[in-house]
Image (cartoon, rainbow, N blue to C red):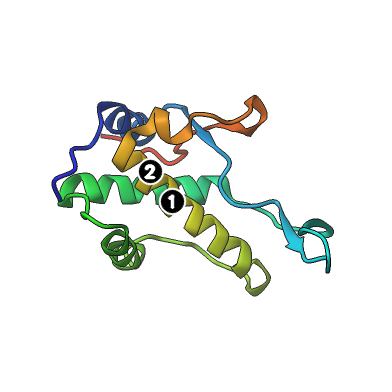
Amino acid sequence: MATKIKADTREALADWKAGKPVRSLELGHVHRMQEHPGMGPRIDMSQRIDRNQERAHAYCFHLIELFSINGVPATHEAFVEACDAYGQAFDWGELPIESRDAFDTEREAAESLAWKALLVGWRKAIDGHGDGDYIEVKREAVEAT
């Protein structure tokens, strides 16, 4: 728990909580991969997986907030265990059976981004992608204070 959370990660969390736009990456996969014997995997264009970026980013910032309060675990294994516990306190909303795979991908992507942002900072966590991979996310439901 010795990891100090970087200022840009704290800033991204504060902006999210205030309902301000935050630059991020799309979380999860759009298509399933299909194995082709003798070749590498290819995108299966017959199935599109819908992604809920608002829910995925809400979970990501939920994790960042809890780890900023409770401390960042020293190992990835401990982080994953903590995510399992913290995920119980997150409102996932209604999940239709057919979207469970997409949900798991979103959850894992959100946890991955949170882990990286906690270790190296928000900007470094999202750095190095093509312009088309970036999105702007915003917390829609901001409580009135």
Above or below: residue 19 compared with residue 86: above
Residue 143 appears in the rendering: no
Above or below: residue 58 compared with residue 40: above
Label 1 CA crowd tier, 10 Å (few <14, some 14–19, many 20+): some
Task: Write the residue at 15% across / 51% down.
Answer: 1
Image quadrant in which you'd find residue 16: top left
Q: Which residue is mark 1?
A: 112
Can you give x and y, in whole percent of width and height, for residue 94 in the image?
54, 66
Quarter containing the C terminus: top left
Can you give x and y, in whole percent of width and height, for residue 23 in the image?
49, 28
Q: Is residue 68 left or right of residue 128?
A: left
Element at label 1: helix
Q: Is residue 101 left or right of residue 70?
A: right
Q: Is residue 34 left or right of residue 72?
A: right
In the rendered structure, are the residues bearing label 1 and label 2 in contact, judged by CB atoms less than 8 Å apart?
yes
Task: Write the residue at 40% across / 48% down.
Answer: 60
Image quadrant in which you'd find residue 64: top left
Residue 91 appears in the rendering: yes
Can you give x and y, in whole percent of width and height, for residue 68 in the image?
21, 44
Task: Write the residue at 36% across / 29% down.
Answer: 15
Whole-number angstrom distance, CA of label 1 to CA of label 2: 6 Å
Image quadrant in which you'd find residue 118: top left
Q: Which residue is mark 2?
A: 116
Instruction: Pick whichever, 137 or 76, lies toward us.
Output: 76
Q: Is residue 144 left or right of residue 39?
A: left
Instruction: Pick whichever, 129 or 40, lies toward us.
Output: 40
Going by the numbered disc 1, the residue's amino acid type is Ser
Element at label 2: helix
Instruction: Pick whichever, 75 or 62, lies toward us.
Output: 75
